[in-house]
Amino acid sequence: MRTEMKQAVIVVGAGPVGLVTANLLVDDGISVCLVETCQDLPRDLRASTFHPPTLDMLERFGVVGRMIEQGLICPTWQFRDRNEGVVATFELARLSPDTGHPYRLQCEQWRLGEMLYARIKDNPLATVRFGTKAVGARQSADGVEIDVRLPDGGNETIRGSYLVGADGMGSVVRQAVGAQFDGITIPELFLTLSTTYDFRQSMPDLSNISYLSDPSEWYVLIRTAGFWRALFPVDASLDDKDVTSPERGERLLQGAVPRSQPYEVTHRTAYRVHERVASTYVKHRMAIAGDAAHVNNPLGGMGLNGGIHDAFNLAGKLIEVVRGAPLNTLERYSRQRRKVALDVVQQTALRNRSILNTQEPKARRAHYDELRGIVENPDKHRSYVMRTSMIQSLRDAEQVL
Ligand SMILES: Cc1cc2nc3c(=O)[nH]c(=O)nc-3n(C[C@H](O)[C@H](O)[C@H](O)COP(=O)(O)OP(=O)(O)OC[C@H]3O[C@@H](n4cnc5c(N)ncnc54)[C@H](O)[C@@H]3O)c2cc1C
């Protein structure tokens, strides 16, 4: 067993949240050891929506121009009824006074990961260790330690002053913090199919991000720079092979938008979705952020964005603490960001799911009438997009002491 030299901050997990945290700390002159269990940065297709305030935050890294070049600007998004068409189209230009990026950007999250890794990989303040899995963590009055497993089966202990767990839903650091992770698991699996077919040929008034409501089978269409992604709920009792079979994909796509030709599907993933928030995000010198701290359904694109907002909040407070502020400064991070996860992210994601899948006709009409009322009223329209683009939650969190 070897023991690594002490770093100021150990970050576990090189997903978007860990990489944002590491970049912020290193930019401020603080040494970071970032450990990642994978041998390389993951390139799998996950979230692709970046909301306006997230883009505002990421500007300081000089990556947003390239994200825009590689991505797709989406000035509107909409709710539709699967049979009747558009219910409400939301316009993000209404946010022009509040953001430098009044649109959603569709850009695969791995692209941001690669840009952020490139920024720090040669910085002497950053040690990035791939193939290194954290298996346990503990703290004392003046430091933290993590036990890691190396690719050759060896073990090592890494010491630091503070620990950030950005290690995703199955977080080891969350266990060390002693937080509960209560909540629910959504009964259906989410199946995502990427296709080269341009759905605007069948629905000319389709926004690049559209949620299509239906009492028996709702779905979501999201356009990225290279293809469209369709997301369908599927029965969670099916086995993995059946869920992602080409036949199922073709059946679902033809059922949604019938065509004389088969769909060309370039990628398929199915995943289980949870709604959970950790009971605390901080214990003394340890903190968790992103999916390690909260998970929710992807309807509204708030998981990744909320995680990046956590990273900015937490890194800001860690910088203060490293520079001499009291340790309990970190606890305000937990109060602020837990409140956002509980009151905004979970509520919005659950409400979006309810708009999509409500079966009772009267309740469906009521949802539609409410959405139409919002888009027709300029004040309501603006405050709705302030909330759903997460600007409002950042402002509200500032009021939490
Ligand atoms: C299949 C899938 C599809 C998704 N699709 C969408 C979507 O369409 N829209 C949406 O909004 N959100 C989606 N999400 C959620 C979104 O991707 C997450 O909210 C986002 O990735 C959170 O970032 P993170 O950095 O907190 O965690 P992650 O991206 O999960 O990163 C955690 C990192 O920590 C590493 N790690 C984990 N444990 C350890 C350990 N013990 N030691 C060292 N390293 C460790 C992992 O390898 C990983 O690289 C999806 C998630 C999945 C799994």
Image: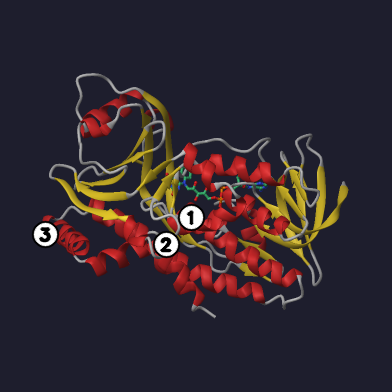
In this rendering, position of residue 62 left or right of residue 76 = right
Q: Which residue occupies 15% across, 61% down?
A: 369
Relative depth, front residue between 133 and 320? 320
Query: Could you tell which of marks 2 and 1 lies nearer the N-terminus?
Result: 1
Find residue 49 and report its horizontal and vertical position in percent: 43, 47
User: Which percent across, then down, holds residue 347?
Assistant: 36, 64
Residue 109 visible in the shown view: no
**Quarter of the image containing the C terminus?**
bottom right
Query: Mark 3 — residue?
Result: 362
In the image, is residue 208 above or below residue 89?
Answer: above
Tell me how far mark 2 sits from mark 1, CA to CA: 8 Å
- Lateral position of residue 78 relative to residue 150, left or right: left
Viewer-side label of 2, 3: 2
Other residues around mark 3 within 10 Å, as few (<14) / some (14–19) / many (≥20)? few
The color scheme shown is secondary structure
Residue 80 seen in this snapshot: yes
Q: Amino acid at mark 3?
A: Lys
Displayed quadrant of residue 317: bottom right
Quadrant of the image occupied by residue 272:
top left
CA distance for labels 1 and 3: 33 Å
Above or below 364: residue 119: above
Q: Which mark is residue 305?
A: 1
1 vs 3, front mark: 1
What is the x, y in percent for residue 290? 55, 56
The residue positioned 34% from the left and 58% from the top of the image is: 350
The residue tagged 2 is 390
2 and 1 marks in contact (CB < 8 Å): yes
For mark 1, give the secondary structure.
helix
